[in-house]
């Protein structure tokens, strides 16, 4: 019985909160993607800065999401993104989308796309240099004014964060396996 409890506790200790936190305009898409936009629900620049604990962030308003997942050194964290905007090329306002990563001493802020590259898509990849909890997020900012909307859609997130229910199920399965092995011996 002691072994079963240990196995269950080990499974529970692996549980990482896989809940998305968001501000501004954020929604989960039916196909499994995430969409954030600089529409009327966007929030002031200061809220986005505080949300990511950034010292500097250009822009007037924006939206963002963030999440935490357990990552192992050597894992590749990646996702596909599509940036679209109503701004014309050459506009003085450079709305932009970005990614923020924090893992131990690593702190990365990278622009994914700008309005001057209207309707651009790509794949973001980053190699984990250490193991631990990776805090990551994606945001989008209006730069200059709030007249036109820009959107970024994130899909194919890898590694996929497992919800707590999956960890509980897996720990239960391990407990049953351990119980059967003990009973057999």
Image: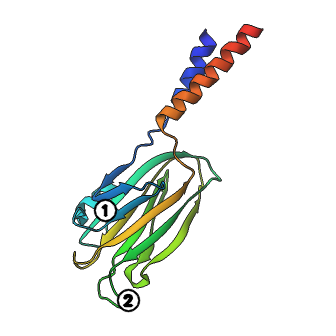
Q: Is residue 53 visible?
A: no
Q: Is residue 9 above or below residue 64?
A: above
Q: Secondary structure at mark 2?
A: loop
Among numbered discs 1 and 2, the one appearing first in the sequence: 1
Taking the view exactly as shown, the residue that stands out farthest to the bottom is: 90
Q: Is residue 151 above or below residue 162?
A: below
What residue is rendered at 40% in x and 75% in y?
84
In the image, 75 versus 123, the foreground residue is: 123
Are the two marked residues, 1 and 2, in contact with CB atoms closer than 8 angstroms?
no
Q: Quadrant for residue 86, please give it.
A: bottom left
Residue 183 percent across, percent down from the top left: 72, 8
Q: Is residue 41 above or below residue 5?
A: below
Taking the view exactly as shown, the residue that stands out farthest to the right is: 185
User: How would you rate the neighbour count of disc 2 (Cα within 10 Å): few for under 14, some for 14-19, many for 20 or more?
Assistant: some
In the image, 143 versus 147, the foreground residue is: 147
| Number of the label disc, if any, that sits on residue 89 | 2
Q: Secondary structure at mark 1?
A: strand
The residue pinned by badge 1 equals 63
What residue is rendered at 50% in x and 46% in y?
69
On the picture, is 153 further left or further right than 168?
A: left
Residue 64 percent across, percent down from the top left: 34, 59
User: How would you rate the neighbour count of disc 1 (Cα within 10 Å): few for under 14, some for 14-19, many for 20 or more?
Assistant: many
Q: Quadrant of the N terminus?
A: top right
């Amino acid at each position: 019985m002691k072994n079963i409890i240990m196995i269950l506790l080990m499974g529970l200790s692996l549980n990482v909160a896989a809940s998305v936190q968001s501000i501004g305009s954020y929604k989960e898409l039916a196909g499994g993607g995430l969409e954030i936009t600089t529409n009327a629900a966007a929030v002031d620049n200061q809220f986005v800065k505080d949300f990511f604990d950034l010292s500097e962030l250009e822009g007037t308003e924006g939206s963002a999401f963030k999440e935490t997942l357990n990552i192992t050194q050597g894992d590749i964290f990646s996702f596909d993104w599509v940036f679209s905007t109503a701004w014309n090329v050459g506009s003085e306002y450079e709305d932009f989308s970005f990614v923020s990563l924090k893992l131990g001493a690593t702190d990365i802020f990278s622009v994914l796309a700008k309005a001057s590259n209207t309707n651009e898509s790509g794949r973001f990849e980053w190699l984990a240099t250490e193991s631990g909890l990776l805090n990551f997020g994606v945001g989008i900012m209006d730069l200059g004014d709030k007249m036109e909307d820009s959107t970024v859609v994130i899909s194919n997130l890898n590694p996929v964060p497992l919800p707590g229910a999956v960890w509980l199920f897996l720990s239960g399965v391990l407990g049953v396996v351990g119980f059967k092995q003990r009973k057999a011996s």
